[in-house]
Amino acid sequence: MTTPKIAIIIGSTRPGRSADTVARWVYDVATDRDDATFEVLDLIDFDLPMLDEPMPPMSGEVTHEHTHVWGAVIGAFALTEPDSGSDAGALRTAAVAEGDGWRITGSKQWITNGSHAGTLLLFARTDPATEGPRGVSAFLLDGDQVEVTREEEKLGLHSSSTADVRIEGAYVGRERLLHEERKGFTVAMHALDGGRIGIAAQAVGIAQAAFDAARGYALERRQFGTRIADFQAIQFKLADMSMEIDAARWLTYRAAWLKQHGHPHTAEGAKAKLLASRTAVRVTQEAIQVLGGYGYTREFPVERYYRDAKITEIYEGTSEIQRLVIARHILAQHEGRVAPTVV
Ligand SMILES: Cc1cc2nc3c(=O)[nH]c(=O)nc-3n(C[C@H](O)[C@H](O)[C@H](O)COP(=O)(O)OP(=O)(O)OC[C@H]3O[C@@H](n4cnc5c(N)ncnc54)[C@H](O)[C@@H]3O)c2cc1C
């Protein structure tokens, strides 16, 4: 069965709007109670115009030419390649200078909204002599400049498109370069810093949905002549789930608040994503346990929450990478230096 794909656009002020980050994450949490896919589609789409908010490395850099390509189209963020996932700075898609622009050739993997994107924020190497992140630049491509080569079949998030795309000699003018040449990784990291808060909110929403379902079921299901909610073993599960969700939610709010008020939020966003994604996986697993056999069936939504939860530990940086980000920040902080960038 083909699941319908849903896109929504919040607000009508783009380009150039100033999003309220906390409000947005609250919205994410609320949305994910129903369907994580709904949120991930919106999240990726929403992250792109957020790049035109003032921010330290790009302030004043984004021109009208950049922003006017944002319209009522779905956006995609195209960083990952077959041989560069966590090590995103190793990407090989090449942008070769030609005239007053670049000709781009390469392939991108697992791009959310890849099949429907009207605009792609795509990262390519403009400096082949420089290996790693420093040779990378960020470009805005139109959807018809890429070819979808594969639609992924996934464990969860079934109504979200995850596609591989090929770029074969797509020409972009200088006005499609975002920020400066060789500063593309700064753009990517900035987007991921904010995006991770969104994934944390997504995870909190999934966990909350699973908790609500488990609590509701525990209060109705009767065994041994009483509600299963009367068994201490079930009560302790619900207590732990509730506590973990609260902790994840408050870390997420803190990171969102810091971002909204223009404070550094790299480590805080990583902490929020790390805890919230772990919470989502654990809580959805426990919710299945509370529902017993019904939890394992499609009659109840908790098996879907469980499948959807797992991706939050993987995309926008795996949990291992979040730990690297946090560790580098706390060590650098102790030594009074700036933490090196890591995906
Ligand atoms: C559904 C879905 C949607 C996605 N959407 C997008 C998108 O819109 N745009 C986009 O650009 N990408 C997207 N991705 C890609 C996603 O961001 C990557 O899958 C993720 O960053 C991990 O990369 P990888 O899968 O290549 O894993 P790898 O990097 O190969 O990692 C494999 C394992 O090794 C571990 N590992 C790697 N390096 C280290 C290290 N230094 N220290 C410790 N452990 C390490 C990882 O944590 C992981 O456990 C999506 C992926 C999926 C599945």
Image: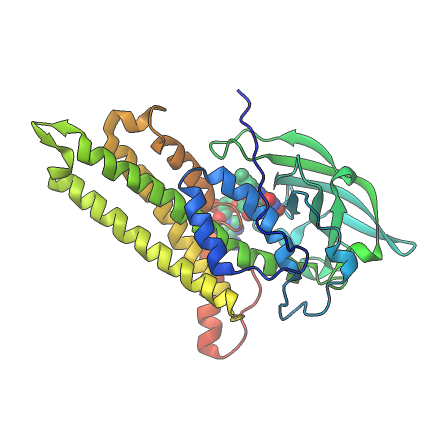
Left or right: residue 140 compared with residue 271: right
Indicate the quadrant where residue 285 lies. Answer: top left
Residue 24: image x %, image y %? 50, 54
**Outermost residue, front side:** 12
Looking at the image, how many numbered discs can be counted on the residues? 0
20, 322: nearer the viewer: 20
Residue 275: image x %, image y %? 38, 54
Q: Residue at x 69, y 37 (%)?
A: 165
Residue 48: image x %, image y %? 64, 52
**Outermost residue, left side:** 225
Indicate the quadrant where residue 212 lies. Answer: top left
Residue 85 visible = no
State which image quarter holds ligand 1: top right
In the image, residue 21 sits, relative to residue 74, either above or below, namely: below
In the image, residue 184 sits, relative to residue 210, either above or below, namely: below
288, 320: nearer the viewer: 288
Residue 125: image x %, image y %? 75, 53
**Outermost residue, top side:** 1
Left or right: residue 2 compared with residue 208: right
In the image, residue 301 sits, relative to residue 271, either above or below, namely: above
